[in-house]
Image (tube, rainbow, N blue to C red):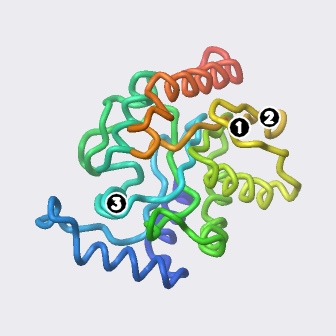
């Protein structure tokens, strides 16, 4: 889609948030010792995946030494591998890991994006930074016309998505209380599902397990199949 490619280029060249620009470029220059021989991406990270996806996964932001290094969201870190293991197990990805942009990973019926496109210090974007990125997510919602399920990863991603949804639809978003496995109808054809974020803090403490995330993705698959019988 030409419009999505145009959006991708706009995302990559964005410098609207001085704090995020300074942080992402400083991380890319200093690097982590394990990646000292690599060239860091160091720019905003666009969404990616199946352009006819019925499932849209919305995360928080690229990781400083994950997406900010590799140039692909949920790639090159433990969170990305955890998410891909679950997507692979439920048929949404062709392999259970996400290492770099040329690792052969193919997403099937799923598109992955985030509410913030630059790595934020401490993984904590400010409200104004989330607002600056919101138009990018609104345009993705407009362009990804086949989406029937939106899966948000974490409370901040859920709130950020709902604000973008409200801006797109020009109406108040549904009242939502974040909870893992929560399910809320967005309109007549789209459903919101929620999950804890696959951060190491959540996965290493057992707050989020692979079976828990798989269950949410299996529910997403069930909804998408019901919304379009006989397709994919």
* 29 versus 180 height, above or below: below
The residue lying furthest to the top in this view is 230
- Label 2 CA crowd tier, 10 Å (few <14, some 14–19, many 20+): few
Which residue was labeled with disc 1?
192
Report how far apart the C-alphas of labels 1 and 3 lie in the structure: 27 Å
Residue pictured at 39% horizontal, 77% vertical: 23
Asked if residue 97 lies left or right of residue 132, the reply is left
Asked if labels 3 and 2 touch by Cβ distance under 8 angstroms, the answer is no
| Res 29 → quadrant | bottom left
In the rendered structure, the answer to whether residue 221 lies left or right of residue 11 reads: right
* Distance from Cα at disc 2 to Cα at disc 3: 32 Å
Q: Residue at x 55, y 27 (%)?
A: 217
Picture coordinates of residue 222 (x, y %)? Answer: 63, 19
Query: Residue 207: percent from the left, percent from the top?
Result: 50, 35
Q: Residue furthest left?
A: 37
The residue located at (50%, 46%) in the rendering is: 112
Question: At numbered mark 1, what does the secondary structure look like: helix, strand or loop?
Answer: strand
Disc 1: CA contacts within 10 A as few (<14), some (14-19) or many (>=20)? many
In the rendered image, the vertical position of residue 60 relative to residue 194, given as above or below: below
Q: Are marks 1 and 2 in contact (CB under 8 Å)?
A: yes
Q: Badge 3, how many Cα within 10 Å: few under 14, some, many 20+?
A: many
Image location of residue 119, percent across then percent down: 43, 66
Determine whether the residue tagged by mark 2 lies in a helix, strand or loop: strand
According to the picture, the residue beneath numbered tag 2 turns out to be 185
Q: Nearer the viewer, mark 1 or mark 3?
A: 1
Quarter of the image that includes the C terminus: top right
Residue at label 3? 71
Lower sequence index among marks 2 and 3: 3
Please, what secondary structure does the residue beneath circle 3 have?
A: loop
Residue under the point 34% across and 39% down:
81
């Amino acid at each position: 889609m030409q419009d999505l490619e145009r959006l991708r280029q706009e995302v990559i060249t964005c410098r609207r948030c001085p704090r995020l620009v300074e942080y992402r470029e400083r991380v890319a220059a200093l690097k982590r010792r394990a990646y000292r021989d690599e060239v860091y991406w160091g720019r905003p990270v666009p969404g990616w995946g199946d352009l006819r996806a019925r499932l849209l996964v919305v995360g928080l932001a690229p990781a400083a030494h994950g997406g900010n290094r590799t140039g692909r969201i949920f790639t090159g870190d433990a969170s990305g591998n955890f998410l891909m293991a679950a997507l692979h197990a439920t048929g949404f990805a062709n392999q259970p890991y996400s290492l770099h942009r040329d690792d052969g990973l193919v997403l099937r019926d799923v598109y992955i994006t985030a509410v913030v496109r630059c790595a934020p210090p401490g993984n904590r974007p400010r409200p104004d930074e989330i607002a600056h990125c919101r138009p990018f997510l609104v345009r993705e919602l407009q362009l990804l016309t086949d989406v029937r399920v939106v899966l948000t990863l974490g409370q901040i991603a859920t709130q950020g998505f709902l604000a973008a949804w409200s801006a797109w639809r020009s109406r108040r978003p549904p009242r939502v209380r974040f909870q893992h496995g929560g399910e809320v109808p967005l309109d007549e054809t789209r459903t919101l599902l929620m999950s804890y974020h696959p951060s190491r803090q959540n996965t290493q403490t057992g707050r989020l397990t692979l079976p828990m995330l798989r269950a949410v993705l299996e529910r997403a698959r069930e909804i998408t199949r019901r919304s379009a019988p006989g397709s994919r």
